[in-house]
Amino acid sequence: MVRALRGTVSAFNHAKRVSLVALALSLTMWLVVFLSVGGEWFLMWQSKSWNGQEAAFRMVTVVGIVLLVVAQSEIADQP
């Protein structure tokens, strides 16, 4: 994305694909692995010292917001 920053809008939108895939994988990892599998399968919610569900929810929220911001398409008429 940094290399395509000074280029055309279509090149910049094309360069966002790698970051979108990485953010989607990160969101899936935090949501599925830590919240679903860790929380329910390993009963993480029952432990007071090993409960990582709040931290995992914060990471899902942050990664989701960044994913939404990056996923927005750039327009060509910007100054």
Image (cartoon, rainbow, N blue to C red):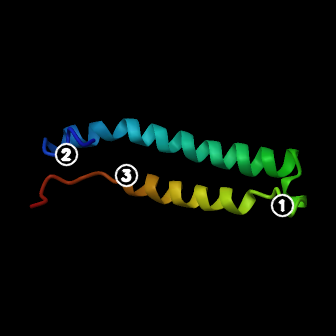
The amino acid beneath tag 3 is: Val
Of labels 3 and 1, earlier in sequence is: 1
* Quadrant containing the N terminus in the rendered view: top left
Q: Can you identify the residue that label 3 sits on?
A: 70
Image side of residue 4 versus residue 34, left or right: left
Q: Position of residue 34 (x, y in %)?
A: 72, 48
- Dot 2 corresponds to which residue? 5
Mark 1 lies on residue: 49
Q: Earlier in the sequence, mark 1 or mark 2?
A: 2
Q: Distance between the Cα atoms at labels 3 and 2? A: 13 Å
Question: Distance from label 3 to label 1 (Cα)?
Answer: 35 Å
Q: Splitting the image into 4 quarters, where does residue 49 fall?
A: bottom right
Is the residue 52 above or below the residue 15 in the image?
below
Marks 1 and 2, Cα distance to the nearest angstrom?
A: 44 Å
Residue farthest toward the left in the current orientation of the protein:
79
Cβ atoms at labels 3 and 1 below 8 Å apart:
no
Question: N-terminal of the two: label 3 or label 2?
Answer: 2
Indicate the amino acid at tag 2.
Leu
- In percent of the image, x 89 and y 51: which residue is there? 43
Q: Residue at x 33, y 41 (%)?
A: 16
Work out which quarter of the rendered image holds the C terminus and state it. bottom left
Quarter of the image where one finds residue 32: top right
Nearer to me, 75 or 15: 15
